[in-house]
Amino acid sequence: MTADSRPNAVSVQPDLLLGAAQELGLSSADIRQVHTDTESAPPSAIFGALVEAAELAQALADSVTIASTDLGTSAGRTEHIGGLLAAGSRAYADLDRNTAGMIDGGLAA
């Protein structure tokens, strides 16, 4: 959207909205991949023979679960926002076509 010369008006550029929606779609796919990569915690053997190994492994598993859940939520929200931008782009483009058709129809009459 860009500022218009009229107060309280904006000029919407559907192609820019669609481009932003596509970028969000790519970002969502990247976030979802990280989410998939972090769904399982590393094995507890990474802590070796430490007395606290089981405790550390559980803390790590809990942290990974929280991070993975948050990544899944972020991916879903990013995808949702991208869908809203794409829908807005289509709506503005349709409105532009309809308005142009009405103007052309009015000028032809």
Image (spheres, rainbow, N blue to C red):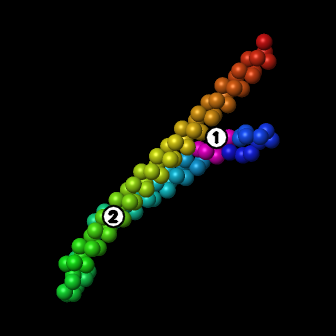
- Tell me the quarter of the image containing the C terminus: top right
Could you tell me which residue is drawn at 40 percent across and 63 percent down? 34
Q: Which residue is mark 2?
A: 66
Could you tell me which residue is drawn at 67 percent across and 31 percent down? 96
Percent of width and height locating residue 37: 35, 64
Residue type at mark 1: give it: Pro
Q: Secondary structure at mark 2?
A: helix
Q: Which residue is mark 1?
A: 14
CB within 8 Å, label 2 to label 1: no
> In the depicted view, which residue is nearer to us: 3 or 93?
3
N-terminal label among 2 and 1: 1
Magenta segment includes 14: yes
Q: Is residue 42 visible?
A: no
Percent of width and height locating residue 75: 43, 54
Could you tell me which residue is drawn at 64 percent across and 40 percent down? 14
The correct choice, above or below, for 36 with respect to 76 in the image is below
Judge left or right: residue 5 versus residue 42.
right
Q: Residue 95 sits in which quadrant?
A: top right
- Tell me the quarter of the image containing the N terminus: top right
Could you tell me which residue is drawn at 67 percent across and 42 percent down? 13
Percent of width and height locating residue 104: 75, 21
In the image, the segment drawn in magenta is 12-18
The correct choice, above or below, for 28 with respect to 8 in the image is below
Front position among marks 2 and 1 = 2
Residue type at mark 2: give it: Ile
Magenta segment includes 95: no
Judge left or right: residue 102 versus residue 60.
right
Residue at the top extreme?
Answer: 109
